Protein backbone atom coordinates (compact mmCIF):
# COMPACT_ATOMS: atom_id res chain seq x y z
CA UNK A 1 0.00 0.00 0.00
CA UNK A 2 1.45 3.32 -1.07
CA UNK A 3 0.88 6.54 0.85
CA UNK A 4 -0.45 8.25 -2.27
CA UNK A 5 -2.95 5.53 -3.25
CA UNK A 6 -6.71 5.62 -2.94
CA UNK A 7 -6.58 2.48 -0.81
CA UNK A 8 -4.46 4.32 1.77
CA UNK A 9 -6.91 7.24 1.62
CA UNK A 10 -9.57 4.76 2.80
CA UNK A 11 -7.33 2.78 5.16
CA UNK A 12 -6.08 5.75 7.19
CA UNK A 13 -9.48 7.17 8.19
CA UNK A 14 -10.79 3.68 8.96
CA UNK A 15 -7.80 3.05 11.20
CA UNK A 16 -8.25 6.41 12.90
CA UNK A 17 -11.97 5.80 13.52
CA UNK A 18 -11.33 2.26 14.77
CA UNK A 19 -8.66 3.50 17.16
CA UNK A 20 -10.91 6.33 18.36
CA UNK A 21 -13.85 3.97 18.97
CA UNK A 22 -11.62 1.88 21.24
CA UNK A 23 -10.49 4.93 23.27
CA UNK A 24 -11.66 3.47 26.60
CA UNK A 25 -9.49 0.36 26.35
CA UNK A 26 -5.75 0.84 25.85
CA UNK A 27 -5.09 -2.90 25.40
CA UNK A 28 -7.59 -3.15 22.52
CA UNK A 29 -6.30 0.08 20.98
CA UNK A 30 -2.77 -1.34 20.90
CA UNK A 31 -3.96 -4.65 19.46
CA UNK A 32 -5.97 -2.77 16.82
CA UNK A 33 -2.94 -0.66 15.81
CA UNK A 34 -0.74 -3.75 15.68
CA UNK A 35 -3.24 -5.49 13.41
CA UNK A 36 -3.58 -2.37 11.23
CA UNK A 37 0.23 -2.22 10.97
CA UNK A 38 0.40 -5.84 9.85
CA UNK A 39 -2.31 -5.20 7.25
CA UNK A 40 -0.52 -2.08 6.00
CA UNK A 41 2.84 -3.85 5.79
CA UNK A 42 1.36 -7.04 4.32
CA UNK A 43 -0.53 -5.10 1.64
CA UNK A 44 2.80 -4.18 0.10
CA UNK A 45 4.17 -7.75 0.09
CA UNK A 46 2.85 -10.47 2.35
CA UNK A 47 6.08 -12.47 2.01
CA UNK A 48 7.79 -10.06 4.42
CA UNK A 49 5.16 -10.26 7.16
CA UNK A 50 7.34 -12.77 8.98
CA UNK A 51 9.97 -10.07 9.49
CA UNK A 52 7.61 -7.66 11.21
CA UNK A 53 6.11 -10.48 13.30
CA UNK A 54 9.58 -11.62 14.43
CA UNK A 55 10.54 -8.03 15.23
CA UNK A 56 7.29 -7.41 17.13
CA UNK A 57 7.47 -10.60 19.18
CA UNK A 58 11.17 -10.25 19.98
CA UNK A 59 10.83 -6.61 20.99
CA UNK A 60 7.76 -7.30 23.13
CA UNK A 61 9.48 -10.27 24.76
CA UNK A 62 12.60 -8.22 25.39
CA UNK A 63 10.49 -5.54 27.05
CA UNK A 64 8.97 -8.15 29.35
CA UNK A 65 12.41 -9.57 30.19
CA UNK A 66 13.80 -6.12 30.93
CA UNK A 67 10.80 -5.32 33.13
CA UNK A 68 11.25 -8.51 35.15
CA UNK A 69 15.07 -8.31 35.33
CA UNK A 70 16.24 -5.25 37.26
CA UNK A 71 19.89 -6.31 37.33
CA UNK A 72 22.56 -5.69 34.70
CA UNK A 73 21.05 -8.48 32.61
CA UNK A 74 18.52 -6.02 31.21
CA UNK A 75 21.29 -4.30 29.24
CA UNK A 76 22.24 -7.66 27.75
CA UNK A 77 18.65 -8.31 26.63
CA UNK A 78 18.47 -4.84 25.12
CA UNK A 79 21.76 -5.32 23.28
CA UNK A 80 20.68 -8.72 21.91
CA UNK A 81 17.38 -7.31 20.69
CA UNK A 82 19.12 -4.35 19.04
CA UNK A 83 21.53 -6.73 17.30
CA UNK A 84 18.61 -8.83 16.04
CA UNK A 85 16.59 -5.86 14.76
CA UNK A 86 19.56 -4.07 13.22
CA UNK A 87 20.68 -7.36 11.68
CA UNK A 88 17.28 -7.81 10.05
CA UNK A 89 17.39 -4.22 8.80
CA UNK A 90 20.93 -4.57 7.47
CA UNK A 91 20.19 -7.85 5.74
CA UNK A 92 16.97 -6.94 4.00
CA UNK A 93 17.58 -3.26 3.31
CA UNK A 94 21.32 -2.83 2.81
CA UNK A 95 22.77 -6.22 1.83
CA UNK A 96 22.41 -5.72 -1.93
CA UNK A 97 23.76 -2.17 -1.70
CA UNK A 98 26.96 -3.31 0.03
CA UNK A 99 27.29 -6.37 -2.21
CA UNK A 100 27.05 -4.23 -5.36
CA UNK A 101 29.40 -1.58 -3.93
CA UNK A 102 31.99 -4.21 -3.06
CA UNK A 103 31.71 -5.68 -6.57
CA UNK A 104 32.23 -2.21 -8.07
CA UNK A 105 35.37 -1.71 -5.96
CA UNK A 106 36.72 -5.07 -7.11
CA UNK A 107 36.07 -4.10 -10.73
CA UNK A 108 38.11 -0.90 -10.20
CA UNK A 109 41.11 -3.08 -9.42
CA UNK A 110 40.53 -5.42 -12.34
CA UNK A 111 38.91 -8.30 -10.49
CA UNK A 112 35.76 -9.91 -11.84
CA UNK A 113 33.40 -10.82 -9.00
CA UNK A 114 31.00 -13.66 -9.62
Image (tube, rainbow, N blue to C red):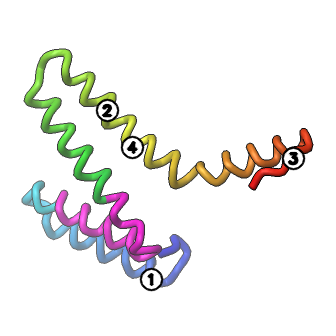
Q: Secondary structure at mark 3?
A: helix
Q: Percent x, y for residue 59? A: 26, 44
Is label 4 in contact with label 2 (beta carbons under 8 Å)? no
Q: Which residue is mark 2?
A: 80
Q: What is the distance, in whole Å, between disc 4 and disc 1 at their CAs?
A: 29 Å
Sort mark 3 into few (<14), some (14-19) or many (20+) by Cα contacts within 10 Å.
Answer: few
Of labels 3 and 1, earlier in sequence is: 1
Per the rendered image, the range of residues in magenta is 30-52
Q: Which residue is mark 4?
A: 85
Q: Quadrant of the C terminus?
A: bottom right
Q: Judge whether 68 appears above or below 96 on screen.
A: above
Q: Which residue is mark 3?
A: 107
Q: Secondary structure at mark 2?
A: helix
Q: Main secondary structure of the magenta part?
A: helix
Q: How many marks?
A: 4
Mark identifier at residue 16: none
Q: Which residue is mark 1?
A: 7
Q: Judge whether 36 appears above or below 111 on screen.
A: below
Of labels 3 and 2, earlier in sequence is: 2
Q: What is the distance, in whole Å, between disc 4 and disc 3 at their CAs?
A: 32 Å
Q: Is residue 89 left or right of residue 41?
A: right
Which of labels 3 and 2 is toward the front?
3
Which of labels 3 and 1 is toward the front?
3
Of labels 4 and 3, earlier in sequence is: 4
Amino acid sequence: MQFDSYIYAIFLPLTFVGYWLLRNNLKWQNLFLLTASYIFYGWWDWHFLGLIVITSISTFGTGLLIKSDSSRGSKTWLALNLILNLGILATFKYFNFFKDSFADILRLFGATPD
